[in-house]
């Protein structure tokens, strides 16, 4: 096992199995500049490979993604990829999504991808061009503003790559796939209940992202149990308030960023079960986070599984937040093919994706269930 690898992860839940079903956030979290996708670079070092677990924790049998091709003589499915690649604000993020999308298309070879570059001002016009150009499916826009602009015009299956604003009038042709952190928070609430926790504490900081995690977690927990969640803002209320609240809790959700999380974890009793979203998954996590339960996409924590390894890694080194967008592009392509081939889309539409187990919810947004893993230091 490589000595440089500081992270050992043991998969605890079944990805692609029968676990309970469950990007703007990623775009906001991408603090490092992206690297050009046109040049090949040595891959960035990442987390240690998942070790062979003990017999009791063996990975479940998971089906590999089969290759599918168009029927002989049939017209190839046409997918319009509507992304703001010309945008100064989002152009780099859009380029990463497109790279993942086209990588999946090259592997599957069951659809024709038509690029539809558009910025914030031209997205509606470009969407109309896609529809009149006989696209079977449109993937995009990437922003909520863009989604609002095209929503009334959606006459072919359209897979938006962000959450749908509740104010948008529902359109049966409009779907959503995103990497929103609210879905992770809801999954963690369910996991805590499954673990037998009854009195969770949520530690937040002053960031808007922390509040979003807390609000989604609290809503899911309260909706199922009828009980309120204890919330402490470590920035405003201080360490003593965290310690006092921990005395009556049987689990804690670290809804803080990866820089603050180690300090918060050190405050808490070692025996207090700790949970966190994928934002705590870094290349070299602090040893203070050993034992913290987090969820993250199979693209990172099950990279050697055939269903994930089927798709090529980026040709240039990316930050982890950026690479999440690449994985999003892969699953967006695969869902687009399903949407284009399925008449009368079923509410049970599922995909065992590289970003997680995806299921179409009643609100036409795809929910993700991700593997639960435990952070731990490698033994020298």
Image: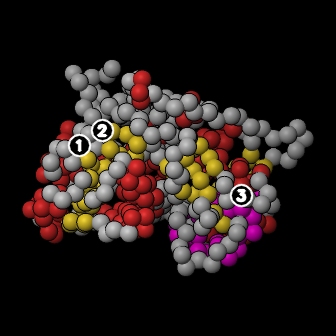
Front residue of 368/248: it is: 248
Q: Where is residue 365 in the image (x, y as percent from the top left)?
A: 58, 62
Q: Residue 289: which disc?
A: 1
Q: Earlier in the sequence, mark 2 or mark 3?
A: 3
Asked if the stretch drawn in magenta spans residue 281, the answer is no
Most extreme residue toward the left is 240
Magenta residue span: 136-160
Relative placement, left or right, of 92 versus 229 is: right
Mark 3 vs mark 1: in front: 3
Q: Where is residue 338 in the image (x, y as percent from the top left)?
A: 71, 50
Q: Is residue 30 in view?
A: no
The quadrant in which residue 376 appears is top left
Q: Is mark 3 on a helix, strand or loop?
A: loop
Relative to 84, is 262 above or below? above
Q: Which of marks 3 and 1 is nearer the N terminus?
A: 1
Dot 3 surroundings within 10 Å: few (below 14), some, or many (20 or more)?
A: few
Q: Is mark 1 on a helix, strand or loop?
A: helix
Q: Where is residue 87 in the image (x, y as percent from the top left)?
A: 51, 63
């Amino acid at each position: 096992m490589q000595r440089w690898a500081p992270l050992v992860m043991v998969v605890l839940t079944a990805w692609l199995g029968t676990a309970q079903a469950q990007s703007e956030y990623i775009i906001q979290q991408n603090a490092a500049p992206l690297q050009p996708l046109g040049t090949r670079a040595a891959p960035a070092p990442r987390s240690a490979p998942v070790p062979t677990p003990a017999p009791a924790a063996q990975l479940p049998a998971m089906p590999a993604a089969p290759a599918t091709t168009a029927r002989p003589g049939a017209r190839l499915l046409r997918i319009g990829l509507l992304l703001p690649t010309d945008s100064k604000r989002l152009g780099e993020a859009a380029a990463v999504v497109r790279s993942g999308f086209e990588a999946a298309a090259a592997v599957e070879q069951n659809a024709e991808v038509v690029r539809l570059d558009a910025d914030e001002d031209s997205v509606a016009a470009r969407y109309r061009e896609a529809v009149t150009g006989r696209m079977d499916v449109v993937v995009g826009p990437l922003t909520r503003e863009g989604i609002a602009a095209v929503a009334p015009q959606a006459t072919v299956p359209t897979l938006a790559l962000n959450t749908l604003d509740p104010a948008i009038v529902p359109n049966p042709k409009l779907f959503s796939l995103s990497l929103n952190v609210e879905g992770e928070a809801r999954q963690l609430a369910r996991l805590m209940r499954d673990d037998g926790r009854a009195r969770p504490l949520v530690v937040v900081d002053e960031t808007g992202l922390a509040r979003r995690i807390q609000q989604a977690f609290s809503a899911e927990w309260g909706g199922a149990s009828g009980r309120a969640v204890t919330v402490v803002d470590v920035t405003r209320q201080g360490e003593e308030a965290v310690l006092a609240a921990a005395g009556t809790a049987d689990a804690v959700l670290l809804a803080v960023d990866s820089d603050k999380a180690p300090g918060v974890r050190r405050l808490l009793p070692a025996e207090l079960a700790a949970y966190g979203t994928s934002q705590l998954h870094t290349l070299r996590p602090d040893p203070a986070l050993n034992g913290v339960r987090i969820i993250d996409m199979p693209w990172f924590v099950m990279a050697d599984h055939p269903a994930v390894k089927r798709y090529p890694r980026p040709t240039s080194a990316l930050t982890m937040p950026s690479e999440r967008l690449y994985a999003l592009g892969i699953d967006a392509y695969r869902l687009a093919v399903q949407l284009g081939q399925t008449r009368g889309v079923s509410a049970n539409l599922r995909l065992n994706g590289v970003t997680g187990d995806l299921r179409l919810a009643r609100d036409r947004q795809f929910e993700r269930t991700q593997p639960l893993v435990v952070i731990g230091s490698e033994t020298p």
